[in-house]
Image (cartoon, helix red, strand yellow):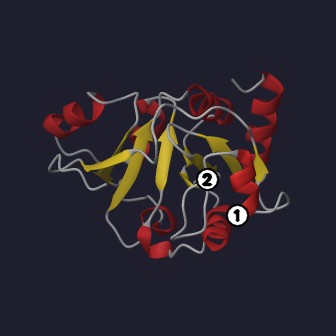
């Protein structure tokens, strides 16, 4: 698990507009403050990812991401909450205020309440959700080690926090919260 010092360092880096790489359930993630437009746009540029695709937010608990969502009914809420915390990402209707740089060209947002200890601790130290996208250039294999992260991104661009991945062999499954259908 990340030390308290490393958690404080990561949270401070995020608050100052920095980008971090950190272990998640199956791959290393790239993260930043989701409400810092400049940080999100830098992250997208580093990944060479189109802004139209949208991003995933992870949180330590549902309360951290609930303000970002517009869940229309108890059936959808129950479907989502039955899998959290855990390695399941849901595509959920976004609250009207959620910026385009997070949603892309969609009216939805991808979200997850993580059960990965380090990723959860990062969200708690930061005090809210963080962006979580695989640490790789678009179209390439996601990084599963700090060395692999550094092959994609140089240290001044991304601050790497080494740690153990969760038990998955790749990125988390993604489901549509409206239908329950698996997308990835």
Q: Earlier in the sequence, mark 2 or mark 1?
A: 2
Disc 2 to disc 1: CB gap under 8 Å: yes
Q: Is residue 50 above or below residue 181?
A: below
The quadrant in which the N terminus is found is top right
Q: Mark 1 sits on what residue?
A: 152
Q: Position of residue 115 (x, y in %)?
A: 47, 27
Q: Is residue 43 above or below residue 26?
A: below
Identify the secondary structure beneath mark 1: helix
Q: Which mark is residue 27?
A: none
Q: Quadrant of the rendered structure where residue 127 is?
A: top right
- In this image, 147 relative to 138: left or right? right
Q: Residues within 10 Å of mark 2 (few under 14, many from 20)?
A: many
Q: Position of residue 181 (x, y in %)?
A: 18, 50
Q: Is residue 98 above or below residue 24?
A: below
Identify the secondary structure beneath mark 2: loop
Q: Position of residue 40 (x, y in %)?
A: 62, 63
Closer-to-camera residue (71/56): 56
Residue at (61%, 47%) from the top-left corner? 144
| Residue 166 is at least partly visible in this image | yes
Closer-to-camera residue (139/75): 139
Number of marks in picture: 2
Closer-to-camera residue (57/63): 57
Residue at (44%, 58%) from the top-left corner? 98
| Residue 19 is at least partly visible in this image | no
Q: Mark 2 sits on what residue?
A: 143
Residue at (64%, 59%) from the top-left corner? 36
Q: Quadrant of the rendered structure where residue 66 is?
A: top left
Q: Position of residue 176 (x, y in %)?
A: 24, 52
């Amino acid at each position: 698990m990340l030390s308290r010092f490393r958690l404080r360092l990561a949270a401070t880096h995020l608050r100052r507009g920095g980008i971090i790489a950190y272990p998640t359930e199956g791959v290393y993630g790239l993260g930043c403050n989701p409400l810092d437009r400049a940080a999100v746009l830098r992250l997208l540029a580093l990944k060479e990812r189109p802004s139209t695709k949208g991003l995933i937010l992870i949180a330590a608990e549902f309360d951290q991401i609930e303000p970002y969502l517009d869940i229309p009914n108890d059936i959808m809420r129950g479907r989502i909450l039955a899998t959290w915390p855990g390695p399941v990402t849901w595509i959920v209707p976004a609250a009207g205020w959620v910026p385009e740089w997070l949603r892309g060209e969609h009216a939805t947002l991808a979200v997850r309440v993580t059960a990965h200890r380090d990723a959860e601790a990062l969200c708690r130290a930061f005090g809210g959700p963080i962006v979580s996208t695989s640490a790789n250039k678009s179209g390439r294999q996601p990084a599963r080690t700090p060395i692999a992260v550094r092959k994609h991104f140089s240290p001044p661009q991304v601050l790497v926090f080494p740690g153990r991945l969760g038990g998955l062999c790749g990125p988390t499954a993604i489901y549509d919260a409206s239908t329950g259908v698996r997308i990835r």
